[in-house]
Image (cartoon, helix red, strand yellow):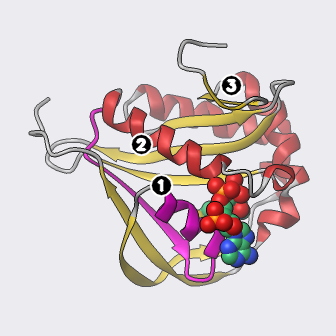
């Protein structure tokens, strides 16, 4: 446990991702491959390997160190990864914005974990990262994800045609944002 570990349920923690999570990520993404296929870009087989996840996490953690991203995981009582939440494309200056992506293991669906974790991401985005805004986008028929964002205080701000290449096609997405504070963008 780190001092940035939060308990989201009696058996589930929310904490920053580490390189040591790579084997657990590979196992969870392989386990959930069919469950998430509809909402994800098409991935090469390498993505689902420990080496693939080590490569991905190394790049992500370098991005974090450069202030451009912040990756968190949900972990179960055995410290296995059961979800991931990432702020990427972080920009400062007058924008102070991050782009949110996430998934939760099918075995833990419907427990309110994504909603609680998105709330924790927004707290840390405001209090640790000094961001003003978090944005997210969902395929137009991803109702569970839209429910998560609505419950976590996001508002829909529009719909973008052909926004991301998901499950083999350029998909229309609903766009959401949550404003975190109205302080001046100093620093
Ligand atoms: C979207 C996702 C993160 C939700 O995780 P979760 O921990 O189950 O979310 P929560 O339990 O906090 O909330 C889920 C909400 O969706 C609702 N929901 C679930 N399936 C639904 C369906 N088929 N139709 C309508 N609502 C549905 C739940 O009832 C709940 O809303 P409620 O509290 O109003 O009842 C998870 O389903 C997932 O990882 N999906 C695959 C990847 C993905 O879509 N990522 C997001 C890309 S934008």
Callout 1: SS: loop
Judge whether residue 167 can be spotted in this image.
no
Pointer 3 residue = 19
Residue depicted at x 41% and y 42%: 122
User: 10 Å neighbourhood of mark 2: few (<14), some, or many (≥20)?
Assistant: many
User: Which of the pair 94/65 is nearer the observer?
Assistant: 94
Classify the position of ligand 1 by quadrant: top left, top right, bottom left or bottom right. bottom right
In-image side of 88 versus 141 (left or right)? left
Q: Between tags 3 and 1, which lies in front?
A: 1
- Answer with mark 3 or mark 2, whichever residue precedes in sequence: 3
Q: Which residues are magenta?
A: 129-151
Q: Earlier in the sequence, mark 2 or mark 1?
A: 2
Q: Is mark 2 within 8 Å of ligand 1?
A: no
Identity of the residue drawn at 44% across and 25% down: 65
Q: Which residue is mark 1?
A: 152
> Residue 59: where, in percent of width, then height?
57, 36
Q: Is residue 136 magenta?
A: yes
Q: Do the CB atoms of the residues marked 2 and 1 lie less than 8 Å apart? A: yes
Q: Earlier in the sequence, mark 3 or mark 1?
A: 3
Q: Secondary structure at mark 3?
A: helix
């Amino acid at each position: 446990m780190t001092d940035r570990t939060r308990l989201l349920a009696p058996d589930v923690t929310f904490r920053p991702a580490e390189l040591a999570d790579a084997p657990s990520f590979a196992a969870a993404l392989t386990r959930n491959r069919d469950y998430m296929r509809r909402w994800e870009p098409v991935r090469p087989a390498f993505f689902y390997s420990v080496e693939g996840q080590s490569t991905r996490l190394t790049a992500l953690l370098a991005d974090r160190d450069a202030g451009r991203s912040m990756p968190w995981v949900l972990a179960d009582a055995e410290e296995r990864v059961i979800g991931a939440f990432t702020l990427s494309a972080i920009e400062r200056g007058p924008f102070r914005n991050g782009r949110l992506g996430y998934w939760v293991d099918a075995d833990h669906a419907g427990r309110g974990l994504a909603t609680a974790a998105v709330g924790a991401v927004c707290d840390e985005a405001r209090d640790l990262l000094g961001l003003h805004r978090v944005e997210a986008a969902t395929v137009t028929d991803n109702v569970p994800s839209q429910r998560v964002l609505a419950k976590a205080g996001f508002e829909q701000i529009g719909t973008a045609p052909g926004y991301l290449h998901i499950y083999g096609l350029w998909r229309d997405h609903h766009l959401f944002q949550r404003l975190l504070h109205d302080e001046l963008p100093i620093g």
